[in-house]
Amino acid sequence: MNKKVLALVVLSFGAMGFGKSVSAANFASASVNVTLSGTLSMSIVGSTFTILSSVAPGGSAVAVSSITLLNDSVGIVETFTLKSFDSTPWTLAQNPGFNQFALQAIFNSVAPAAAAFVVGEDSLTTADKVSTAAVFAGNQSGAAVPPGESRGLWVRFQAPTSTTSFGSRDLTISIVAGL
């Protein structure tokens, strides 16, 4: 075979794609597993208590200052869950009654009026209750709080309409940071 014919055969095979690599698929995928670590964390800035004025049976009062909650986690957006507790012989209720008191709470940047507290959605219970855009919300919300931001928690107390016990009382609110 002469050199011209051999060159022509090689050029013909090259034009048909024999010089290219051939594969069955034109893409591939791989999985990457990653674990994001972090810690939910919130703290109370300043005082861990607030003071209510003296309240007569059947009366109510809004706290004179807020409890300031800070999301001090690193990079985690948190939502606050709240609850309160009975205080023997009083029981926590949505509406006050005989030996029954009510507590409402809202997140607000300034002192809210008593009318800002909504019985039901802002009422504390003895079960965990998650903050939302409506629940415990004033002009701030305890839901989706970005890292480094704080919220003012204001409390309204409604005294029992009648009682077998009076005097000073400490009431506890549990606040938990979650996702």
Image (cartoon, grey):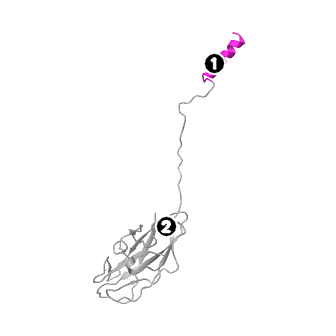
Residue 16 lies in the magenta stretch = yes
Identify the secondary structure beneath mark 2: loop
For label 2, count other residues whose C-alpha is less than 10 Å away and answer few (under 14), some (14-19) or many (20+): many
Disc 2: which residue: 145
Q: What stretch is highlighted in magenta?
A: 1-18
Residue 111 against residue 30 in the figure, above or below:
below
The one nearer the camera, 54 or 31, is 54
For label 1, count other residues whose C-alpha is less than 10 Å away and answer few (under 14), some (14-19) or many (20+): few
Give amino acid for label 1: Ser
Query: CA separation, marks 2 and 1?
Result: 69 Å
Taking 19 as reference, is 57 left or right? left
Disc 1: which residue: 12
Residue 85 circle label: none
Residue 175 lies in the magenta stretch = no
User: Of marks 2 and 1, which one's residue comes earlier in the chain?
Assistant: 1
Give amino acid for label 2: Val
Rendering coords of residue 34 (x, y %): 53, 52
